[in-house]
Amino acid sequence: MARKKKSLPVLENILITDVAAEGKALARVDDLVVFVPFVVPGDVVDLKVLRKKHSYAEAVAIRFRQFSEKRAQPFCPHFGVCGGCKWQILPYEEQLRYKQKQVMDNLTRIGKLELPSCSPILGSQMTREYRNKLEFGFSNKRWLTAEQIASGEEFEHREAVGFHTSGSFDKILPIEECHLMDDINNRIRNGIRDYAYAHSLTFFDARVHTGLLRGMMIRLSNTGELMLLMQFCITNEQERQQAEGMLQWLHVNFPEVSSLLWVNNTKFNDTFSDLPVERFSGTDHIYLQMENLRFKVGPKSFYQTNTDQAYILYKVARDFAQLTGSELVYDLYTGTGTIANFVARQARQVIGIEYVPEAIEDAKVNSQLNGIENTLFFAGDMKDILNRDFIQQHGRPDVIITDPPRAGMHQSVVDAILFASPQRIVYVSCNPATQARDLQLLDEQYQVARIQPVDMFPHTQHVENVVLLTRR
């Protein structure tokens, strides 16, 4: 006989007190910490507990008894379903306050470091339409909300183009209006959708791996250029002709697209980094401008998605580096060499290291494009390249700038930095928790001298943080 499932309680009149990880807020009920999405501190709610562990639980608000004074009206019609921009209901000034608090909590609790005062977080001037890159997926199975399912609403089209929903790999939430990028993203995406409906084009089925329309990527430059890449799954001649027909329609109807590209992806995943990209019209790249530098960005290139705030972030890193023109700088996790080229004119030489070979080729091109001759770039796994032999061959750096992925730095990279023993380390991080862990590993030889959070992603819980370390 099957064991009867234990019913979980409803908690009444609960005050939401703080902001937590993953864009959720939290409440405390006796000794239990309860994580709740789509509420803000100051809300008083009834909570339905979804799962409960010994010391914490996850719940959803089923009734609002009192709204917080610190609550904003969400501006996106997809808020609460999409899963992105979860902090729309929190005024931007409050978002910044909690992000700075998150940074300092991580450095204090995880790093257990002796810290200077934190500089006020640098907020984003643009809190909407700030992204230069968006990716959308196609599916023959649109995501239905609980209300839509309950209503039995019939849809003329079950196909959708939009964002993947959390917990479902094969369904797409149809997006009508996205405020993360200039409205051009809505006009192109919705235009493609309507063209596909009118011409009976098939949308991708992630379970059987068929369907012509698989994905799309839009990149928008501050030079006015626009890249559109269509990801197809072409398996026969008819689908090839349909793809060409759509590309021709896009070329005619969206003349602002200066780089129209496509890729045929019949793999079992959506990544196309290992696939050839074809050019239908225009160029195979766009340029982004930063100060007097131009950066060539291709369909596979990495570039910070908030162009204006990337400039602020890199200015902070350059300021922290305190370059006089005589320093040897190592730029770890250099990507396409954006930071390396940004600081090169203030340094004697900059050496950049990056795992992705294509990114390193972009970095070299960007140096050539800007007439920068004092950079060297190396491709390979950081923990394999940055070792004692490399440092002895190329020289001990005066300054190390490191901008690792969310997972932080491998222990061997930390060890190599300690061996290199630079005067200063500038640590740029998109994850203050792993940054704090790494700073603790460096603490014996380096002290934290400056802390500067930078908000790159308004209406989300994510925050960048720059720390200056000086040798003890």
Image: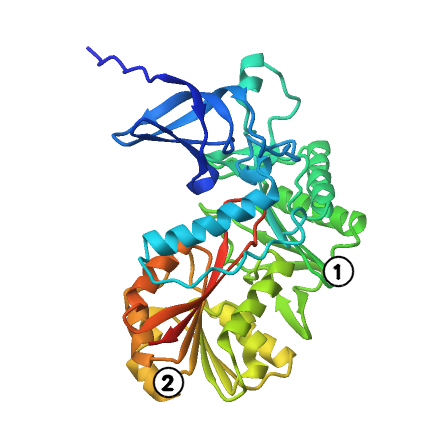
Identify the secondary structure beneath mark 1: loop
The residue beneath circle 1 is: 224
* Residue for point 73% across, 40% down: 191
Q: Which numbered disc flags the more N-terminal residue, 2 or 1? A: 1
Q: Residue furthest top?
A: 1
Q: Residue 380's x, y, as percent?
A: 39, 71
| Closer mark to the observer between disc 2 and disc 1 | 2
> Which of the 4 image quarters holds residue 123?
bottom right
The residue closer to the viewer here, 470 or 462, is: 470
Instruction: Work out whether 45 lies above or below 117.
Output: above
Q: In which quarter of the image is the N terminus?
A: top left
The residue beneath circle 2 is: 396
Instruction: Work out whether 352 lies above or below 436.
Output: below
Instruction: Work out whether 401 lies above or below 16.
Output: below
The residue closer to the viewer here, 69 or 98, is: 69
Instruction: Tell me which amino acid carries mark 1.
Output: Gly
Q: How far apart are the alpha carbons under marks 2 and 1?
A: 41 Å
Q: Which residue lies furthest to the front in this view?
A: 117
